Image (tube, rainbow, N blue to C red):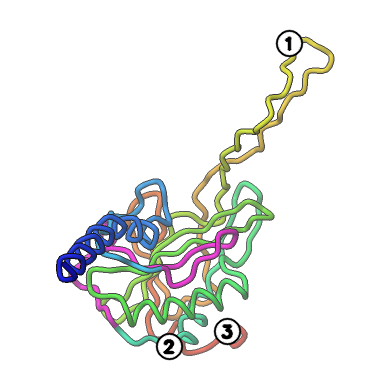
Amino acid sequence: MAVILIMLKKILFLLLVSFLLPFFSIEADSSKIYSKGYVNPVNALNSFLWNKKKEGSIGLTSNVFIDNREVTATLHPISFDSSKIKIAFSKIKYLDEKKETTDFIFNEENLEILSKYTSKGLSLANKNQDIIFQFLNKKEEKLTQGIIFIQKNSLNLVFFSIHDCVLEKVKEKKKKKKEFHKNHPNFSFIKKKNCNSSKKKIAVLSSKGIYKKKTNQQYSWIIFTAEAWQQNKSGLN
């Protein structure tokens, strides 16, 4: 009788694990960073390298197929020092032609986080995976998204969006407000925020070891070679 009870407990445990495993996989899948199909679905259990709801996410995802990319040339896993990544990424800026402004794509905090977890991710990823990231500026409602990978001894950074506007979903309120006719003096209009999504141009502080590569029209592909991370931005001419 005792043996039968033990066997039943084991069977119940296995059934419970098989039932719960898909939910844990979905929760931990870092390809869920994006909701607009930028990346391929990942069936394997992937964990976020860094994830803060109001700040952004960094994780591993399956290779993202973009124009002119030779996916088979991806060199992962690989050891890549975080300080080199930080130096390289600190040399790129963006131009907003509509607002006529120029600024760095990554602030100091984002650079520190991205370089640290990109270095970690590159050492963990296999040849079929990329580093995927997004940073959210909640105050300005701006979003920066992209992928990172190593290919042919170069550090590759592909942007899907750069300081783009964020369209947040309006949560349904529990209490229904009294509706007024359009012409009623107490009618309250809700103004929509001016959110014009547009591709930003990229500028570099030094052309040494930094190249642009043609890819999908809505993306921006930047390639960094050894010269790009040999000196900091403060040492540029």
Q: Is residue 177 above or below residue 195?
A: above
| Mark pair 1, 3: CA separation | 62 Å
Q: Quadrant of the N terminus?
A: bottom left
- Residue 187 visible: yes
Q: Which residue is mark 3?
A: 236
Identify the amino acid type marked 1.
His
Q: Which residue is mark 2?
A: 81
Identify the amino acid type marked 2.
Asp
Which of 19/230 is in front?
19
For mark 3, does the 10 Å Cα neighbourhood hold few (<14), some (14 to 19), or many (20 or more) residues?
A: few
What x and y, as percent, mark residue 148? 38, 69
Label 1 SS:
loop
The residue located at (43%, 88%) in the rendering is: 81
Q: Which residue is mark 1?
A: 181
| Mark pair 2, 1: CA separation | 62 Å
- Magenta segment includes 56: yes
Label 2 SS:
loop
- Reading the chain from its start, which is encountered first: label 3 or label 2? 2
- Residue 66 visible: no
Q: Quadrant of the C terminus?
A: bottom right
What x and y, as percent, mark residue 35? 41, 48
Q: Is residue 48 above or below residue 82?
A: above
Instruction: Please report the bounds of the magenta region as a residue range.
Output: 48-77
